Amino acid sequence: MNMNEDLFSNMNVLIVEDSPTQAILLKEALERHHLKAHIAKDGYEALQELQKSLPDIVISDIEMPRLNGYDVCKHIKSDESLKAIPVILLTNLTNSMDVIKGIECGADSFLTKPFEINFLLSTIHDVLENRKLHRTSEQEKKTSFYFSGQRHFLQVNQVQIMDLLLSTYSNAVQKNNELEKAYRNLNLIHEELEKKNDELNDLNIQKNQFIGMAAHDLRNPLTVIKGYSDLLLTRLSDKVDKDSLRILERIQSSSSFMLRLINDMLDISVIESGTVSLHKSDVKMADLIQESIILHQSGAKKKNVKLIFNCKNSGLIVHCDANKMSQILNNLISNAIKFSNENGIVEISLESKDNDILLSVKDSGVGISPEMKEQLFQPFAKSHAQGTHGEKGTGLGLAIVQKIIEEHKGKIWFKSDSGEGTTFFASIPNTK
């Protein structure tokens, strides 16, 4: 502030602040504007400094140990040799009584924290100029008034009250300007975020369209490859050597995995695009689960895993999309088999709870590591990579399951303890 350089030149300021960081920051800011600043780390040290030399102005924090800013100010104003020194109190002004305490101790001005350096310099300028104007008009008188439900008796002068009220109002205006500026900045940020969000949505739509087209183009040849590999294995399994048979099995398993991946990518792209539609009907849930268990029996036998179905209500009718519900069951049961140990058990349970159906699938694996739990439902999460026999997963199954359950207004969660396996729970409202 150029207009204050002459006024501030060689001016001595005593900073009373118990926070070393805040004190140093304030000192450096003042010195950049040609003021000489000294620091007292608390109220007692400030009083000792005042005995050695008199500053032109004191800037004091209020909340300090041993001796607070109000007491420091009161001591200064009650000492004939010090009372002419202006005192600015740094406060949060979170309590209406702060103004009364400021009047009682004789403070010249308030400054609310945090503050801008230019506003501090402006406050110093006003306090010093007012001190010059009012040196001869400091007659004090006793007065009483009610404030915040209490009666107060004060020995004050009108000039001090006017200065404090003006500084309080000035602080309020300053804070309002800062809030308006912050509000404008937030609006600009909000507009920019909306713009970026629209761009991301457009990119996501393009990504889903690309995945859909690529998956469709890849699915047909993969289906042919898998079909021919299945046929060759059926017809030639006892007519070719072991190496050739192993090559055919590799072709079949790889094409099967790629086909599952393609189908999952198509599913996730449709779900994420928001174009998924549910075709709901009344479904006997126990029959749907039994069908899924039969479908996975051969895979379970390879690991000697036993599939157990616990049903508390075999006649439970659920209003849902039967195909999507089968997809949920197939994903959860196949995952449970994949992550179960040899000779393990997979338990599928079904019950009705309040107006919801509760489905659970428990495996007998090693559980999920803590670092993997947070990303479990994320697409391509690494925790889905391999089962206990090296089975591959696409990394999309649980993400798809979660999306389908959410489309049914339900929720999915899991419980997993190290060495005790994992249980997935799905709760779906049974309403039409």
Image: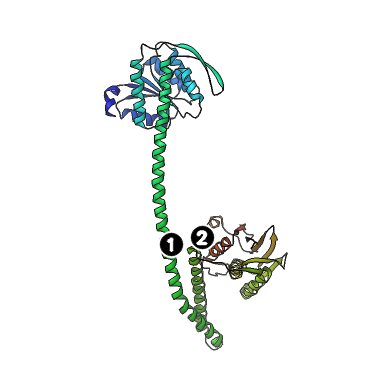
Vertical relation: 391 (above or below) 11: below
Instruction: Give whichever of discs 2 and 1 has the lower sequence position.
Output: 1
x, y percent for residue 22:
41, 31
Name the amino acid type tagged 2: Gln
Q: Nearer the viewer, residue 226 or 107?
A: 107
Q: Is residue 96 left or right of residue 11?
A: right
Vertical relation: 33 (above or below) 232: above
Q: Residue at x 42, y 48 (%)?
A: 190
Residues at circles 2 and 1 in contact by the CB criterion of under 8 Å: no
Name the residue carrying label 2.
378
x, y percent for residue 201:
43, 59
x, y percent for residue 281:
63, 69
Q: Which mark is residue 204?
A: 1
Q: CA distance from mark 2 to mark 1?
A: 16 Å
Name the amino acid type tagged 1: Asn
Q: Nearer the viewer, residue 399 or 236?
A: 399
Screen quadrant of the N terminus: top left
Q: Nearer the viewer, residue 20 or 25?
A: 25
- SS at badge 2: loop
